[in-house]
Image (cartoon, grey):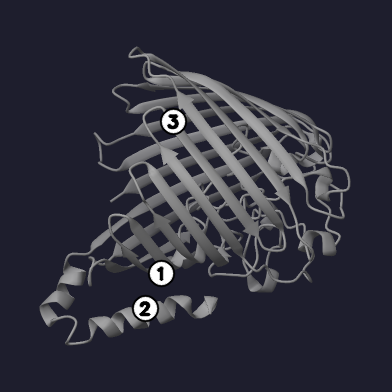
């Protein structure tokens, strides 16, 4: 059923459209004439610079186009949507794969994929979507920091029973990583080219003989008001981990330029019988285990200040004896991507990629020139039992160039990681990552 999901839904909808009793020729044309098309052009240039001579510096350039199309609603709320993405290095890739940052678009000169192809029904209080789609949940999102986002073959439902409240249910079957060209029954713990999947920048700890992933069940509730925001989620990453996740933020509105806030988060994981990581004796950070068990918590304190914000955050990931990775957080769709929601995750990595221990992070951001320019600086420190002590320094420059060309943004992200053990950085030497990203939305 999962592989045929999109086709079955599309055929059913098109058969309704073709029925004279349901729609006239004029209404059929209106569905497309009143539809919507938008997109984005991206030019990304990434550089990985290593202080060790044993690992060559890596570079990648990519020019990409993302096109989104949606029909107008018909039959009381039905619609069809899709997204296509294509990227090319313009023959700038090195002949030596070791000198390519494969996380951007793999080692190939070009890639292309349908990242979305879905049918949905929506009205003012419910949205049901089936097919290839982007997801936006804390531990299963579109990981959109490369030229092509991640996407999922799933059925998702969002119910809005009252203002500020959302109830979400998801059954995900397969997924497409940021460098894949199709949907596959795997996740980031599987090796590259697993069953033909061109997946790079992944964790890759599982053996090639590991059984296929069965997907995920997820359910969540979110609440938003002027002062309070909160989310509660349950994920069943089938045969990997069952996760409970809570996060909340309270903001004190003072009617001044200073609005203090406090955020807190909590994560708890366990596993059922038949866990793939346990059964394959897979080691995370060099440690296999007889179970999956993890617990983490965090707090973030800060305030807005005129056109900026400052905050300091702390996370603790507890040691769990006998567990995979001594209590490593199992995150099938963010590990090695550094896209998890922990407060102290940096551009390069966080506690998901480093295992049990603690981390703290200080961050400041400010807008200039009527919010055309944003500057961000951060410092994060990690003390972990399996990957040692390390710290990251981060700078981010974001320039909104609407006055030149509406929709144009230029951004440069730079981070340097120092320290660590167990080959956290190649040769345990400092590592610098620079990402120049130019985007144009149309």
- Tell me, for residue 234, which label it has, or none: none
- The residue pinned by badge 2 equals 10
Q: Earlier in the sequence, mark 2 or mark 3?
A: 2
* Quadrant in which residue 393 is drawn: top right
Residue 268 on image: x %, y %: 69, 44
Residue, x 78% and y 48% (percent of image)? Answer: 293
The residue carrying pointer 1 sits among few (fewer than 14), some (14 to 19) or many (20 or more) residues within 10 Å by Cα, namely many
State if disc 1 and disc 3 touch (CB < 8 Å).
Answer: no
Callout count? 3
State if disc 1 and disc 2 touch (CB < 8 Å).
Answer: yes
Q: CA distance from mark 3 to mark 1?
A: 35 Å
State if disc 3 and disc 2 touch (CB < 8 Å).
Answer: no
Q: Earlier in the sequence, mark 3 or mark 1?
A: 1
> Nearer the observer, disc 2 or disc 3?
3
- Tell me, for residue 117, which label it has, or none: 1
In this orientation, which residue lies closer to the viewer: 11 or 413? 11
Mark 2 lies on a secondary structure that is helix
Residue 357 on image: x %, y %: 77, 33
- The residue pinned by badge 3 equals 228
Residue, x 83% and y 58% (percent of image)? Answer: 282
The residue carrying pointer 3 sits among few (fewer than 14), some (14 to 19) or many (20 or more) residues within 10 Å by Cα, namely some
Mark 3 lies on a secondary structure that is strand
Mark 1 lies on a secondary structure that is strand
């Amino acid at each position: 059923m999962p592989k045929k999901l999109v086709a079955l839904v599309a055929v059913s909808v098109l058969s309704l459209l073709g029925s004279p009793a349901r729609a006239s020729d004029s209404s059929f044309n209106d569905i497309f004439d009143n539809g919507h098309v938008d997109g984005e052009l991206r030019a990304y240039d990434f550089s990985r610079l290593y202080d060790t001579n044993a690992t060559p510096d890596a570079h990648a350039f990519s020019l990409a186009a993302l096109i989104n199309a949606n029909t107008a609603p018909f039959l009381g709320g039905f619609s069809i949507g899709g997204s296509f993405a294509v990227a090319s290095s313009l023959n700038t890739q090195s002949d030596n794969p070791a000198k390519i940052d494969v996380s951007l678009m793999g080692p190939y000169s070009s890639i292309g994929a349908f990242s979305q192809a879905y049918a949905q029904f929506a009205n003012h209080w419910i949205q049901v979507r089936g097919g290839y789609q982007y997801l936006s949940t804390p531990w299963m999102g579109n990981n959109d920091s490369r030229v092509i986002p991640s996407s999922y073959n799933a059925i998702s439902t969002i119910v809005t029973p009252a203002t500020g409240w959302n109830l979400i249910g998801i059954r995900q079957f397969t997924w497409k990583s940021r460098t894949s060209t199709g949907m596959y029954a795997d996740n980031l713990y599987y090796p590259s080219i697993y069953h033909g999947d061109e997946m790079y920048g992944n964790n890759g700890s599982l053996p090639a003989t590991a059984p296929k992933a069965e997907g995920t069940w997820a359910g969540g509730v979110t609440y938003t008001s002027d002062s309070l925001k909160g989310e509660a989620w349950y994920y069943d990453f089938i045969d990997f981990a069952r996760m409970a996740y809570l996060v909340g933020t309270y903001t004190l509105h003072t009617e001044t330029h200073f609005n203090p806030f406090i955020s807190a988060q909590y994560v708890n994981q366990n596993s059922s019988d038949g866990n793939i990581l346990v059964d394959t004796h897979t080691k995370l950070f060099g440690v296999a285990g007889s179970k999956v068990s993890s617990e983490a918590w965090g707090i973030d304190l800060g305030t807005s200040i005129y056109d900026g914000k400052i905050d300091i955050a702390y996370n603790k990931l507890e040691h769990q004896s006998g567990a995979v990775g001594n209590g490593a957080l199992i995150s099938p769709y963010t590990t090695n991507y550094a896209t998890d929601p922990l407060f102290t995750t940096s551009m390069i990595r966080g506690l998901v990629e480093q295992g049990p221990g603690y981390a703290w992070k200080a961050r400041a951001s400010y807008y200039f020139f009527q919010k055309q320019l944003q500057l961000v600086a951060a410092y994060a420190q990690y003390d972990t039992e399996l990957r040692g002590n390390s710290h990251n320094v981060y700078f981010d420059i974001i320039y909104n160039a609407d006055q030149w060309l509406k929709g144009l943004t230029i951004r440069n992200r730079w981070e340097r990681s120092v320290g660590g053990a167990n080959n956290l950085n190649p040769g345990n030497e400092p590592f610098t990552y620079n990402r120049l990203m130019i985007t144009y939305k149309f």
